[in-house]
Image (cartoon, rainbow, N blue to C red):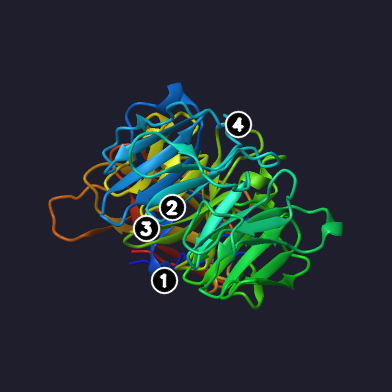
Amino acid sequence: MYRGKYFSIDNFGGGMAPDSPSTSLAPNQATAMDNMIILPNGMGLRSRPGDSAFNATAMNSGANVQGVGYFLKSAGTKWLVAIAGAKIYKSDELDGTMDDITGAYAGLTAGQDNRWSFVTFNDTLIGFGGPKNDPDAPVKWAGTGDVAALGGTPPDAYGGLTANNRVFAFRTATDPSTIHWTVIGDPEDWSGAGSGSAVIGSLSDNEKITGAVVISTNYMLIFKENSTHQMVISQAPFSVYSLFDTVGCVGKDAIVNIDGIVYFISSNLKMYSTDGSAVQSYPGFDSKWINVKSGEEPYVQGNRIKGKDYDWLVWLIRYTGLDDNAGYAYIWDLKNSCWLQCTSGFAQNTATVDPNGRVYYGGYDGKIYKPMQEGVYADASESGAAITAYYRSGWLNPENIAKVTQVHKVEVVGAYKASGNLTLKYGYDGVEDQQTVTISQTRPLTTGQYYHRGTVCSGRGNTFQYLLYHSSAAVDTQITKLVLAGKVYGQKEQEES
């Protein structure tokens, strides 16, 4: 029996803390991690599931997908609609076959940055988008035939949304600070009684509207680059008030409303949230956000993904040093209130979410992908590559692990899997990964759900760091806790029998 001191790490809920020195992290924080789900209340880790392709055949010869929309009619029929290059496609009843419905329409500008937003109104799907400084004319589709231009005199707007039986559209080439709205009930009447427009903020600030979101039946938030405004939408004419004078939003897709709390990415690449009154910031990830590729900041894309044991706010970003068709996901873990990241499986250009919370990503290759599919252990968006997941602790010391020093043993507790191994690496006193141990996660001829496997460490030191690493296209990994054993700080000797 080992007669030293034991310390269990059974909470990983601190997430990834890259802005803090690795020597000062709590035992539940990681200095680096990738492709890991933190279980509710921090009680374990598991590698994330992979993605699958929605359509087997690429749209428009593999053109970038610039917009994806979910279209549900009152009769219950539904489609997934996507813009790829200068063409538009639909999938009947989400059957995975994308049919070209462009027809004679020639108003779409190709290019990955020419993002589109879709809204449903009066059983018609309406799209706004194109180049952000000179948007295309809006399109409509009612579920049959080909797309057409939206009728009436709608603005050629970069973004649109619906609220209180009206369609709103914002940011045109000539009026980038103006939001427009229709009459009640008619998406093609932008000039009749009850329609109108409003300039947001001051014309002297020379800033454009970057996005808008409905926060309740009474209020809409409208963002400019460095300010946030509130529009009262309960009764026309709509009043607009300045809400935050120094905090705005970077782009129209960098806004996500989660249960009445609006999360957004500011122009200086920080995450904030608001309920329409106060604003809250989320520090601790600045050293990662600065790696967003210069010039690509307006194309941060946000969405919520929920699963059986996770609830993520995902921000798709294009990363410095990667090509234009690659990117990462920065993630705010809504269950554990911490930061995570995925550096594979999320190189996507645009997204939509259906009424049941299912997420569809538009890729850079003419395909739509379904992320985080349970039972899938590779990423179709990465040509079937295995999912590599890891968790690297900070430098543990006697002050934060109950006076344990000179760690002598490490035991990993994890869930049995059908195959595969977990790799444990560890090091002492500032030298990472001095030793490597392979831990089988397969079940022996015994009962039970969890293994308890570890190693007697080779080496000594007063600070200790570990890395848990798993890579497989056939199976995942799940870790419940680690148990460290060592001397009590100040103890001169220990015995083992």
Q: CA distance from mark 1 to mark 2?
A: 15 Å
Q: Tag 3: Cα neighbours inside 10 Å, few (<14), some, or many (≥20)?
A: few
Nearest-to-viewer mark from 1 and 4: 4
| Residue nearest the observer in this picture, 314 or 23 | 314
Contact (Cβ within 8 Å) of mark 2 with mark 3: no
| Residue nearest the observer in this picture, 84 or 217 | 217
Look at 26% across and 46% down and name the residue there. 375
Whether residue 20 appears in this view of the structure is: no
Three-letter code for the amino acid on which mark 4 is drawn? Asp
Three-letter code for the amino acid on which mark 3 is drawn? Gly
Disc nearer the start of the sequence (4/3): 4
State the image coordinates of residue 494 (x, y, percent, origin top left): 46, 67
Disc nearer the start of the sequence (4/2): 2
Q: Tag 4: Cα neighbours inside 10 Å, few (<14), some, or many (≥20)?
A: some
Which residue occupies the extreme front position in the image? 193
The residue to which callout 3 is attached is: 357
Helix, strand or loop at mark 2? strand
Q: CA distance from mark 1 to mark 4?
A: 37 Å
The residue to which callout 2 is attached is: 36
The residue to which callout 4 is attached is: 324
Three-letter code for the amino acid on which mark 1 is drawn? Asn
Nearest-to-viewer mark from 4 and 2: 4
Three-letter code for the amino acid on which mark 2 is drawn? Met
279 relative to 368, above or below? below
